[in-house]
Amino acid sequence: MTLLDRTEAAPAHPARLILILSLAPTVGLGIGRFAYSLLLPDMRDSLGWSYSAAGFMNTINAAGYLVGALVTSRLVARFGMAAIVRAGTLACVASLALCALSGNFVLLSAARLIAGIGAALAFVAGGALATTIAQAQPARSAFLLSLFYAGPGIGILSSGLIAPFLLQAAGPGSWWLGWLVLAALSAAMTLPVLLAPIGVDAGLGGGRVAPFKVLPVLIYLAGYFMFGAGYIAYMTFMVAYVRDAGGGAAAQSAFWCLIGISAFVTPWVWRRVMALHRGGLSTTIILAVNAVGAALPLFSLSPLMLATSALVFGVSFFAVVASTTAFVRFNYPQAAWPGAIAAMTISFGIGQTLGPLVVGAITDAIGSLSSALAVSAATLALGAALSAFQRPLRHD
């Protein structure tokens, strides 16, 4: 008898448990990574950063994410998925508080690095745990998984409702206060993760992690790499883009909140698409829509176009990540899920590590954020094309 069999909460209430688990990427990604975009304009003005320096803060965060993804499988095998989810989430909360202490570039870089490591631990272990819990209802497993990956939308929405107006009220140079408030919010969101009975580790064969072979999914990993490199420009610099176009706190908040709100409809919009095919077709469709969303601001900066861009990008952005876990679930045995999800996350992490540096350098050289968005959209489109060539894996 496994722990999944013994714990009634998992099979009886899988949606509730997965929603609680979704608070881990809410803190680690929705707030820990993406809320930086809301504070970036004030930090850049107050601290005298170039776009390259601003991009580096997300590069170091992504580098930490990559490190975390590399070690998560081994840590899961030793300590269990639930413990790693909780430890990673707590590390993210600590890093947010650290960001409020000083404008020192080295200290802020260290905080962003810690946030990246913690987010990866919580995300990879949480994704594998959510996948295990979702198996309690196989017919709804794709939908249940989507609930987990909609989690960052909570963080984006809540930070979008708070940060722009806080900065406006407190005035220039108040970015540190934004970090402090977000740290307090994240601490409150972490409590359910610490208290809920999410320990369902035994479903993975006593903690053993099966080997993962890269070659059969190399083209898929390349497509996911392109997604990691492409999405980050949009999520890092779009609030600055809106502000430079004349948008005040209300416009910035509305734009950011629309991205967050779109996450809540993701499970319903893409449920059938993610169950469509065991190969890369589902990811291709969703990633192509994501590229369209990223490209829309290049044609117009009207409020309607920006709102449409936020909605289209947001609803597909969260679904791309969910589609990769659905791919893992369809093509690998349970014991291989942590390793396979970690491999996907590593590929994604390398892409998002390189993305901010390249985009920041291009923006500094050309002097226009439009070039960054063009590179972002093109990279996402290339990722969609590559994913289309992935075929279902053969099972022995």
Image: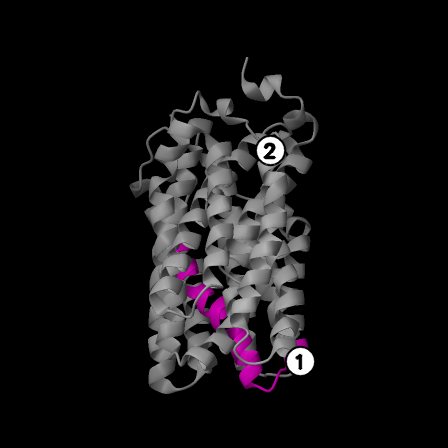
User: For the point 43% across and 59% down, which residue is it?
Assistant: 227
User: For the point 56% across and 56% down, which residue is it?
Assistant: 183
The residue under label 1 is which amino acid type?
Pro
- The quarter in which the C terminus is drawn is top left
According to the image, label 1 marks what residue? 303
- The quarter in which the N terminus is drawn is top right
Question: Is residue 347 at least partly visible in the picture?
Answer: no
Counting from the top left corner in percent of width and height, residue 262 is at 65, 60
Look at the numbered discs 1 and 2 and tell me whether their residues touch, using CB distance below 8 Å.
no
User: For the point 64% across and 71% down, which residue is it?
Assistant: 166
Label 1 crowd bin: few (<14), some (14–19), many (20+), radius 10 Å: some
Counting from the top left corner in percent of width and height, residue 357 is at 34, 69
User: For the point 60% across and 55% down, which residue is it?
Assistant: 184
Identify the element where label 2 is drawn.
Answer: helix
How far, Cα to Cα, is label 1 from label 2? 39 Å
Front-most of residues 196 and 318: 196
The residue under label 2 is which amino acid type?
Ala
Q: Earlier in the sequence, mark 1 or mark 2?
A: 2
Q: Residue 15 lies in magenta, yes or no?
A: no
Counting from the top left corner in percent of width and height, residue 280 is at 46, 48
Q: Quadrant of residue 31?
A: bottom right
According to the image, label 2 marks what residue? 134
Front-most of residues 170 and 257: 170
Give, as a single range, the part of the protein colored magenta: 224-251
47 lies left or right of 141: left
Residue sticking out furthest to the top: 1
Label 2 crowd bin: few (<14), some (14–19), many (20+), radius 10 Å: many
